[in-house]
Image (cartoon, rainbow, N blue to C red):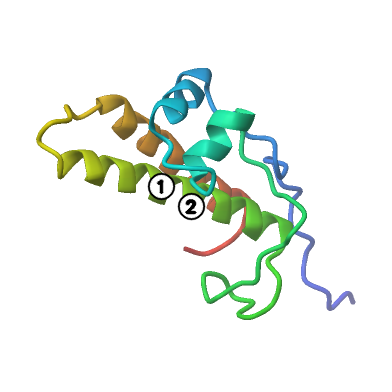
Amino acid sequence: MNDEPPAKPPMKIPVNSIQVPKEFVDLAGEYYAGQADMLYAVASTGNLTTGTNRPIDNGQFDNDREPMTDQQWYLHLFYKLVWSIKDCIQAIAENPDIKPDMRLQDFARWTEARIQELHADYGIDE
């Protein structure tokens, strides 16, 4: 009798594989707030990819104070992107001289949908 749990099915979404649509790459180029902004990462590379300095999990996932897995890191990038987009939307909303750009709402919805897909595919609880 085999006491090992069944193997997880292979992931459908490889790390670093999601392509940001060109319309959102161009939009990111209009709104990024500096090189530390995730919108800049999208505008300059056309994508979100993990790098070389693996982040430490500070409580977002189950491996607190340990390095994130590749899947957690990739998911974390999409969270950072949606937070950046929402910060931009909020800043525009607070400035009466700037007309809201509904494309940013579309970009946020697209990013949130990718977050949900990654959570489901990677088996990472929210």
- Residue at (76%, 48%) from the top-left corner? 10
CA distance for labels 1 and 2: 6 Å
* Towards the viewer: 7 or 37: 37
In this picture, is 89 found above or below 97?
below
Q: Is label 1 in contact with label 2 (beta carbons under 8 Å)?
A: yes
**Image-based side of 7 in relation to 121, left or right:** right
Position of 54 with respect to 3 (left or right) is left
Which residue is drawn at the image coordinates 77% and 71% (left, top)? Answer: 5
Residue reaching furthest to the right: 1
Q: Amino acid at mark 2?
A: Lys
The picture places residue 43, in percent across and down from the top left corner, at: 54, 30
- Amino acid type of disc 1? Ser
| Secondary element type, mark 1 | helix
The secondary element bearing badge 2 is classed as: helix
* 68 vs 32: above or below: below
Quarter holding the N terminus? bottom right
Q: Position of residue 102 (x, y in %)?
A: 25, 27
The quadrant where residue 46 appears = top right
**Residue of label 1:** 84
Q: Quadrant of residue 97?
A: top left
Q: Residue at x 15, y 45 (%)?
A: 94
Q: Residue furthest left?
A: 96
Residue 80 numbered tag: 2
Q: Is residue 108 left or right of residue 15?
A: left
Residue 110 in the image: x percent, y percent?
42, 34
- Work out whether residue 21 or residue 85 is closer to the camera in this orientation and state it: 85
The image position of residue 28, as x and y in percent, is 45, 30
